[in-house]
Amino acid sequence: MTEPTAARIDGLAVRDLHVARGERSVLHDVRFDAPKRAVVALVGPSGAGKSTLLRCLNRLHAPDGGTVLLDGEDTAALDPCTLRRRVGLVGQVPVMLPGSVRENVAYGLDPAAAADADRLTRALRDAGLDADFLDRTASELSGGERARVALARALTREPELLLLDEPTAALDAAVARHIAATVRSLAGAGLGVVVATHDLAFAADVADRAVALRDGTAVSGAPAELLAAARDGDPAAHAAATASDAVEEPGT
Amino acid sequence: MSRPLAQLLASAAFVLAAALLAYRQRLNLSRSLLIAAARAAAQLAVVGALIALVFRVPALAIAFVAVMVLTASLTAGSRMRALPHARRIAVSAIALPALSAVGVLLAVGAFAATPRATIPTAGILIGGAMLATTLTGRRLVEGLADGVDEIEARLSLGDRARDALAPLARRAIAGAMVPLIDQTRSAGLVTLPGTFVGLVLGGASPGTAARVQLVVLLTLLLVQLLSALLTAELVTRAATLPGERVLAL
């Protein structure tokens, strides 16, 4: 081991994570920290295992080796449903459940929380939607609105960390910028965020630190260097990476 | 000309006419038509002989019903091969409701406890249970494959695996029951159901035939609903993994 593992991280700590699919290793020796109040960008080409890694963090996928600690506790020992409420995942496809936006954002909450209009509207506002969206039919929303409802739905659980899988995949640049601002302000309010994205400009916009997945393992560092290394000669990505020089260095 | 000979000649002539027509129209179906007809003839001859034997040796009736359950389970099980224990699921979902219903009907004296009455009744109920199991199972397998995003969204919001699968299970049951309910609703209007036709041809009065048919149809509704519910429950269990996760298909 090259880094100390004993230090208790306030947030998620991934240690020597290993995932195989049959004989093939998908992820190996993945180590990084995702503390609260910080945004970590998980970058890498599609197929690099970003989604699989996110799904290991809320145990939708059971890793084949290694541990994921939440506030120093092994997540494998926590009740999965409690873990998933504390560590919310917004999937790549913003699935709308049947019914209204209200039914979506209140889904699975206990009756008192579901009836708490403040809680629901606060989550919607944090996700960039007005309170009058509550009574809209979820299936009639646009792609961008669905993405926001999916985000609000995770936020009503008042999670400690949020995992976002390609949140800008279906969005135009303006909406992506808005989502980036939302994510930054949520982190400012104490939330830890891990955002998997192939969009390097968005990653540079949003992240305090970056973790690049390369050949199945993780390389962490400041977004600027990693993004510059990952840009693969893409001028737009290069511009974005250079523009992110102002972002603070990681705390390790 | 005797009646059996007339029946044989007429049906053979009809098959040959169909094959000839298909050949003339170059449908490339003649071979399949003739093979299907030959298979049907052979199968029915064997079944006829077997049932004649069963009528003489009632103990064989149990073996005969067991073979029906097994065949139905293999057929339904093959429709949900993607799942672990597909065959075991199919056997339970078919046998429990169908055989319980046969037992109740015999116990209350709705049918005589003879092979002659029991075997056709069991056959219809087992066939109906097979249909319900197949339809529900296929929809569940499709839902597990296509609906994985929705299931994972529910899991990510903190649902137990069983709760995350419940909407899919309910949709599969409802989807399977609709054609079965339609069939019951149109009985006698669109098609004359098999029991009715059989009894009338066998010499029963239309009134008796209608009454027996009604018993069969109404029993089928419950049997099929129970088969669908049982399939959904067993598939939900088979698709639930430790750690509140769901089998990816």
Image (cartoon, grey):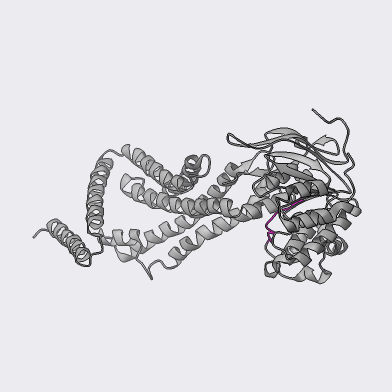
Q: Quadrant of residue B197?
A: bottom left
The answer to whether residue B123 is magenta is no
Quadrant location, the N terminus of chain A: top right
Note whether A29 is above or below A247 in the view shown. above
Residue farthest toward the top in the current orientation of the protein: A1
Question: Considering only vertical position in the picture, is A179 above or below A71?
Answer: below
Residue displayed at 69% across by 53% down: B153
Depth order, front residue of B130/A57: A57
Q: Residue at x 66, y 47 (%)?
A: B162
Q: How many numbered badges does the structure rendering display?
A: 0
Q: Position of residue A209 (x, y in %)?
A: 83, 47
Image location (x, y in percent) of residue A149: 76, 62
Q: Which quarter shows the C terminus of chain A?
A: top right
Residue lying farthest left? Answer: B1
Q: Position of residue A83 (x, y in %)?
A: 78, 43
Report whether residue A206 is seen: no
Please tell me whether residue A89 belongs to the stretch shown in magenta.
yes
Residue interval drawn in magenta = A88-97
Tell me if I can see residue A209 in this picture. Answer: yes
State the image coordinates of residue B180 (x, y, percent, origin top left): 46, 60
In the picture provided, is B108 more to the left or to the right than B1? Answer: right
The quadrant where residue A100 appears: bottom right
Please tell me in which quadrant of the rendered image residue B1 appears: bottom left
Question: B56 or B93, which lies in front?
Answer: B93
Query: A163 or A26, which lies in front?
Result: A26
Q: Main secondary structure of the magenta part?
A: loop
Residue depicted at x 73% and y 51%: A231
